[in-house]
Amino acid sequence: MLHEEGIVKSVHGVNATVMTHRGSACGSCEAHGACKAMGGGREMLVEALNQAQASVGDHVEISIEETSVLKASVFVYLTPVVMLLIGAAVGKMLGARLEMDTDLAAFVFGAIVFALALVIVRQGGRKLGGQPKYVPIVTRILAKEQASDTATC
């Protein structure tokens, strides 16, 4: 299991929104550099199943299965690349058969299939996100929220 720590920002029903700081779990991830390259900063909001019954402000640990992260990453990153290559290869063959510029046909067909792959990944991501094994879980409360105003006599 991958574990990360964070602060509960909101609780709604059985879920909690947790603000995490990319750290130990991200360091061991093969794609940790891609998050920063794609515009992600050090902080990240994570929607998690609140099994530990945490409250707003609690310092918590969230966990998710490593295999789930790996499968989702392969699906998200590899599917568009493979589809692009297949589309370009098919486009090149079709271009030759139709006596067109093969490079242009490879480019156009590859781009169309790549766009289709992005739609498939988006729809598949929504479907995966609804499965329990792909949802992070608040596994334990590390520290309860500290009262912000202290009474003085």
Image: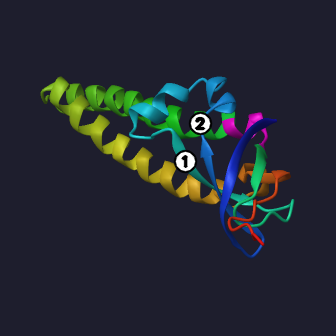
| Residue 80 painted magenta | no
Is 99 positioned to the left or the right of 12 in the image? left
Quadrant hosting residue 69: top right
Tell me if mark 2 has few (under 14), some (14-19) or many (20+) residues whose alpha carbon lies within 10 angstroms of its own: some
Q: Overall secondary structure of the magenta stretch?
A: helix
| Residue identified by numbered label 2 | 22
Residue found at x 75% / y 58%:
58
| Residue identified by numbered label 1 | 44
Residue found at x 77% / y 51%:
60
Give the spatial CA distance, label 2 vs label 1.
Answer: 7 Å
Quadrant hosting residue 89: top left
The circle on residue 82 is: none
Camera-nearest residue between 72 and 61: 61
Is the residue under label 1 in contact with that under label 2 (CB below 8 Å)?
yes
The magenta span reads 64-69
39 over 56 or under it: above or below: above
Camera-nearest residue between 36 and 84: 36
Residue found at x 63% / y 24%:
27
Camera-nearest residue between 1 and 133: 1
Is 113 positioned to the left or the right of 31 in the image? left
